[in-house]
Every structure is written in structure tokens, then in C-alpha cells.
């Protein structure tokens, strides 16, 4: 990894671009390692390039500075917690500063992945898990997304308006991620490559993916620690969550029913709020946590789940004035549109002629001497 410290203006979109060529780049385990642009010590990164690229490929990385005034931008072969082997070349670096877009209209993508086929090592034994979704599974997800569109607007008192695309991606999910807290789940890395063509440059502000990870008929379940939705993740800077189907089609969790469940879209609402919660924190707000409902006297109701809590949490009505700050409803991922009037910055400007080249070398020698002097003082 090679990197450069960059000064930033807070809450501002930035775009870094470069060209990359790779030779024999592959991950050394099940994770996604490769050539990428990233911010050091964070999981914020561009898309990952692997394999052999015959030609130079353009790579871009967009991010919001949030409450930071400087970051270290890095160009690397590998990944956060990930390794790979191979060679990568980087060239033609540029950096642009964009403009914020502050509308309250959110564009959601809800994507069903009907096919999952993974081999996992459970307690030292390799085991195959293969699941498919039924048409009725997909139709439930579709109906809930429709309900979510209205609910999110109602529950925020109109502070969000929503549009969405619902679609199916038939490519099979072949790897899963694991952590002790949640068990197995689909991380953005697991599907980065198959999802990319469907979401790149479509302007989505949030992504739900729907998966099945168990089947009562097969009496088979991937070890999952009691979650039905899992959120707070990022797919290339876009909020991302897993919506997991129940193992049995007799479950009412995602089905509307007058007597049993009048808020079947709850998991969608809950996971999306996790991204709002995280954004509020990352923009420097001190806020109460989404999971602390019982601390503030809220209970899950049989039919409506935690609907009242979500309303109060998003409208700052918990104990009179606690909850999400209103700005959070306009904090959306950075996208191409932010750079229509983008300004190019000099941060990664390479020397354009012989004189600039010599000057750069002289600057570097001077820098080197300063470092050596510094070292001597230290010893
Ligand atoms: Zn949660």
C-alpha cells in the first residue's frame, strides 16, 4: 500500500480516480482482496480489481469526509483484513472535490438473490448448503418493499420520500462472511463483483438484499446467531443490509395479517435506521442507540413490533427530544451527480514536464534530509 495524507473540508464529497493494471491478482482466502483505492484504517474503499487486466482500467473511489479534516488516501493490493497475491500497477491519479446534494428523496434498491450455494466448514467438517427462493418468497419481499416506501415516509413524518427498484439477481452467492456476534451473513465483499453491474452508477442511496439461509423442508440451516435482518454495512459507500427469509414458509414474519402482523416491513425499517444511526454518529452527533428501546420504556408489540419506537426515534421524540438529528435524512452516499461541477485538486498531480520532474525530485530529497535529521534528534 502506498498512501498520502490529504487535508479535507468536513461534510464534503470527494472523488479519487486512477488507472490500474493487474497481473495474476487473486485472493489468498475466501475474502475479496485485490487492487483498490481506500482510506487507511477504514473499510471505505473503491471496487476491487482482480485477475489479469489486459488494458489499464479506470478505478474510482468516492467518499464523504463526514466530520474528518484529514485522511490518508491509499492505493493498495489487498484489502481491509484481507490478503492477495499478484502484481498491480497504478497511474494517472486525480482528485476532485464535489458538491453536496441535500434532497430528502432516497432511492432504494431491493434485490432478491434466489440462489445460494456455499461450502462451509462447521466444527471442522466441510458441509454444503444450497438454497433457493420460491416465487412466493420473492413476492413477499416485493410487497414489503412497497409497504416500506410508504412506512418510511410516514414514520419520518415526511422527512424522507422514497423511490425504489425491486429486482432479482440470478447469479449464485458462493461465499459468506462470518463473525462471532452474528454467525454467517452476506457481506458486501461476498457479492461485490456480481452486484456491481446492477447497481453501478444507478444513483442508489441504500441497498437491501434478500437471502434464504435455511430450509425447514431440508432440515438444514446455516449457523446464524438469531438475526433476521443485519444492517449498518456499506456496499462501496452505500448503506447495505441483509434481509433473511425464515426457514419455514409457515412463518408470518414478512406477511401482512390483520390479527397477527400489521408491520411486516419492520425488518426493512429497522435495518435502514441502523444506517441513519451510523451516519449520525460518523457526522459527530452524540445520539441514543437504536437497540436501547427498553431503556426508554418501549416494548415490542405482537402486531406492530417497535413501530412507535421507530417513529419517536426518527422524530426526536424519545423523552421529549432524544433521537436522530433532522440533518441525517439528507445525508446520502456520494455519487456521480455530486461532481457535475467538480473541482480538480492538486493533491495527486504528477509532474507534467522535465522541470517539474526535477523539482519533485529535489523536494523529495529535501524531505528525506528532514526525516534523517528528525531521526537523529530522536536517538
Ligand atoms: Zn438492529
Image (cartoon, grey):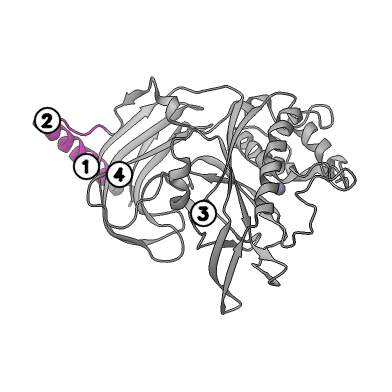
For the residues marked 3 and 2, what is the alpha-carbon distance in whole angstroms?
Answer: 50 Å
For the residues marked 2 and 4, what is the alpha-carbon distance in whole angstroms?
Answer: 32 Å
The residue stretch that appears in magenta = 349-374
- Furthest residue to the right? 259
Dots 2, 4 in contact, CB < 8 A = no
Residue that mark 2 sits on? 353
In the rendered view, does 360 fall on the left or right side of 128?
left
Q: Is residue 364 above or below residue 341?
A: below
Residue that mark 4 sits on? 374
For the residues marked 1 and 4, what is the alpha-carbon distance in whole angstroms?
Answer: 8 Å
Q: Quadrant of residue 277?
A: top right
State the mark number for residue 369. Answer: 1
> Dot 1 lies on which element?
helix
Q: Is mark 4 within 8 Å of ligand 1?
A: no
- Within 10 Å of disc 4 (Cα), the crowding (few <14, some 14-19, many 20+) is few
> Dot 4 lies on which element?
helix
The mark nearer the N terminus, 3 or 1, is 3
Amino acid at each position: 500500500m502506498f498512501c498520502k495524507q490529504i487535508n479535507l473540508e468536513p461534510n464534503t464529497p470527494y472523488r479519487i480516480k486512477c488507472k490500474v493494471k493487474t497481473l495474476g491478482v487473486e485472493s489468498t482466502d475466501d475474502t475479496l482482496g485485490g487492487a483498490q483505492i481506500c482510506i487507511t484504517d477504514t473499510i471505505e474503499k473503491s471496487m476491487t480489481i482482480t485477475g489479469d487486466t489486459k488494458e489499464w482500467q479506470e478505478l474510482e473511489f468516492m467518499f464523504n469526509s463526514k466530520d474528518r479534516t484529514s485522511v490518508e488516501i491509499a492505493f493498495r493490493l489487498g484489502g481491509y483484513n484481507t490478503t492477495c497475491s499478484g502484481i498491480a500497477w497504478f497511474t494517472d491519479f486525480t482528485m476532485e472535490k464535489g458538491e453536496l446534494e441535500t434532497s430528502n428523496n432516497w432511492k432504494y434498491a431491493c434485490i432478491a438473490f434466489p440462489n445460494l450455494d456455499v461450502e462451509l466448514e462447521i466444527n471442522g467438517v466441510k458441509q454444503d448448503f444450497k438454497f433457493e427462493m420460491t416465487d412466493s418468497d420473492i413476492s413477499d419481499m416485493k410487497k414489503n418493499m412497497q409497504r416500506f416506501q410508504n412506512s418510511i415516509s410516514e414514520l419520518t413524518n415526511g422527512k424522507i420520500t422514497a423511490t425504489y427498484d425491486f429486482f432479482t439477481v440470478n447469479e449464485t452467492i458462493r461465499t459468506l462472511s462470518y463473525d462471532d456476534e452474528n454467525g454467517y451473513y452476506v457481506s458486501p465483499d461476498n457479492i461485490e463483483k456480481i452486484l456491481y453491474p446492477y447497481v453501478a452508477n444507478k444513483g442508489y442511496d441504500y441497498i437491501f438484499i434478500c437471502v434464504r439461509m435455511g430450509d425447514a423442508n431440508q432440515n438444514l440451516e446455516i449457523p446464524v446467531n438469531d438475526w433476521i435482518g443485519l444492517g449498518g454495512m456499506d456496499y462501496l459507500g452505500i448503506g447495505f443490509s441483509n434481509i433473511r427469509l425464515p426457514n419455514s414458509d409457515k412463518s408470518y414474519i414478512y406477511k401482512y395479517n390483520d390479527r397477527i402482523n400489521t408491520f411486516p416491513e419492520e425488518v426493512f425499517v429497522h435495518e435502514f435506521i441502523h444506517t441513519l444511526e451510523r451516519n449520525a454518529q460518523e457526522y459527530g452527533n452524540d445520539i441514543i442507540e437504536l437497540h436501547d428501546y427498553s431503556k426508554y420504556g418501549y416494548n415490542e408489540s405482537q402486531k406492530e413490533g417497535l413501530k412507535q419506537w421507530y417513529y419517536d426515534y426518527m422524530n426526536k421524540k424519545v423523552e421529549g427530544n432524544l433521537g436522530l438529528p433532522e440533518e441525517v435524512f439528507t445525508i446520502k452516499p456520494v455519487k456521480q451527480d455530486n461532481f457535475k461541477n467538480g473541482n480538480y485538486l492538486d493533491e495527486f498531480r504528477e509532474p507534467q514536464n522535465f522541470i517539474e520532474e526535477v523539482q519533485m525530485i529535489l523536494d523529495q530529497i529535501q524531505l528525506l534530509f528532514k526525516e534523517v535529521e528528525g531521526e537523529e534528534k530522536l536517538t
